[in-house]
Image (cartoon, helix red, strand yellow):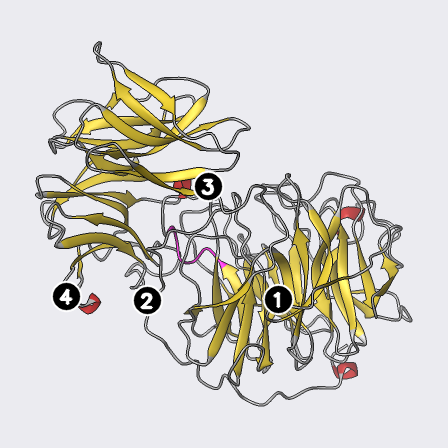
Amino acid sequence: LDDRIAWSPTGSEFAFTSTRQPPKRGLGYSWAAVYVRRLAEPDANAIRLTPPLEADVSPAWSPDGKWIAVATVWDRTTLFITVMDTRGHMRRQLVAGGWPAFSSDSKWIYYHNQDSTGHWAIWRVPVDNSTLPERVSPKGNFHVVTPTTCADPNKIAAVVAFKGKHRQIALLTKNKKGDWNLETVTKAPHHHMNPSLSRSGNIVAYQACSCQKPYQKIWNVYKRYSPIKNLHLIYAGGCQFPTFSPDGKQIMCTAQVGEVPGTFGGANVMNTDGSNRKSLQLPQGPPDGGAWATSWSPRHQMAVTVGLPFPWGTFFAAKNKTTGVYTITNNSSKLWYGGEPVIGHANYTKKDLIGYGDFSPDGEWIVYRAPAYNTNWTSNLFVRPVNGSLPPRQITFGGYECLPHKGCDNHPAWSPTGEWIAFSSKRAGSWNLWAVRPNGTDNHLVWSGQVPVLDENEDAHPRWHPSGKYLVFVSYAGGLNAETVSMGGQTNNPEQWIVPLDGSTWYRLTHNFQREPHHDWTMGTPMNGKSDYVAANCAYDDAISTAPTKSCLPAAVDIPQLFAPVRRCPFHKWV
């Protein structure tokens, strides 16, 4: 991720944020650092200004050419305004806040930060830190963020956000009394963000939402940059929980639609280029839920969880909301379980935790998440034959509450060899990757993102490489890459990672600040070339387009033994 360019006054150099180097402090810390590059020189000559043990975002270059201000990352919610010279020397912190912007005389830095009521506001502080910060934006029941300045010392552009309304671009102008007035200059019914004023202050550029309604059914499928050789990465917009067909030629996913975040639509099947999309007929489910968490059996059977999975910002639905797993065959469907307690679960009363079914490679068994016996708001993993000939059998154990800042066993994924079931769990204190045999033995930790400054870590949603040796998953292990307040309301967004089953190393697959929670992995020729292929979706809260300056620049790397032949095991051996 190369982001947030700040030009020098002469236009011969520019500063920018990049995640091209892993942090010296290790996993869990931000990869972001600020670099300076001459326009006439190659990218390889860029100079890193951020010290090895620190992280910076959002650079700004002073009009007199002497200083660069940045937002130094302390953790995912705390930033500090730092000033240094243009080669990273004389570094000093001024005040808590982010998104610095110099005044036209280079004596002040404007920035945003929260006030005592929790509202975001624009402030300013002297570069020499000789006086206390001053508030610039007026008080009120609204937020003002991402300031940008121009040659006119009495004019600032920013984003204003009123509760329940779209974000708009606003101008802050100083009147004769020295007070700042706020005036909204955009009114379109979609989000606007990240403004930039021309030097004269007569023109403002900004990002705008690419659609009028969040979570529309957008089925654009295209290739994205992959830092790993011979591994293709595609993006399926508007497509939740993508799952490849056994031959790798189709994708099944669910649509996240509607005005309310967290509402899900039906299940769909399409070719890997987005063409020939078909909707699957589902049985009548709960009135407030939709389809999610898909799986595809080699027997051309599909599994979909139906019901309300969670209100936005929490992990699971309110009490007594029913979810269930349905199997689908040839565009018809039948209720597998969900409306009533599953056989063998007679004592539990929480129906809403059943979900995330995944088939065994031979299609005979399914693993799923369900409430454990006699427990309150907990879940563990169970396996049972798809045909229901045997009762469910619990393979993980422990009272891990499925509530925010609590834990449970979740997101099971059966390996292509049949030997393992990977899952995410908080049994070790935070969400990490675990693996267990289908018969419940050899339960062990695979990988931990080691996020030291985040209460709610997430190493989750594992999916297998066809060889059964690698997992692709999401994690916060890359830290904060950019200021979340500029991202349209996103916070703590995980990236895609790859780890071998033994957890001995790791590979970071994506570098951006979009939320990419779901994915799948296959072998074959889904778009072009004989190679591995990962499909990921992005759930972007405001459905905005990314800035044109963003790109991924890490050097391509090989994953050893990535194409090892698949060894499939008889499932009765493990189950």
Left or right of 204, for residue 434:
right
Find the distance from the CA under tag 4 to the CA under tag 1: 40 Å
**Mark 4: secondary structure:** loop
Left or right of 571, for residue 75:
left
Name the residue type under label 3: Gly
Q: Nearer the viewer, mark 4 or mark 2?
A: 4
| Residue drawn at (54%, 45%) of the image | 211
Find the distance from the CA under tag 2 to the CA under tag 1: 27 Å
The tag earlier along the polypeptide, 4 or 3, is 4
Give 382 or 163, whichever is nearer the viewer: 163
Residue, disc 1:
274
The tag earlier along the polypeptide, 3 or 1, is 1
Residue 37 visible here: yes
Find the distance from the CA under tag 2 to the CA under tag 3: 24 Å
Mark 4, other Cα within 10 Å: few <14 / some 14–19 / many ≥20: few
The tag earlier along the polypeptide, 2 or 1, is 1
Q: Are marks 4 and 3 in contact (CB under 8 Å)?
A: no
Give 68 or 386, whichever is nearer the viewer: 68
**Mark 3: secondary structure:** loop
| Residue drawn at (12%, 45%) of the image | 9
Residue, disc 2:
553
Name the residue type under label 1: Gly
Which of the numbered marks, if any, corresponds to residue 488? 3
Residue, disc 4:
41
Give 107 or 376, whichever is nearer the viewer: 107
At which x and y percent is residue 248?
64, 78
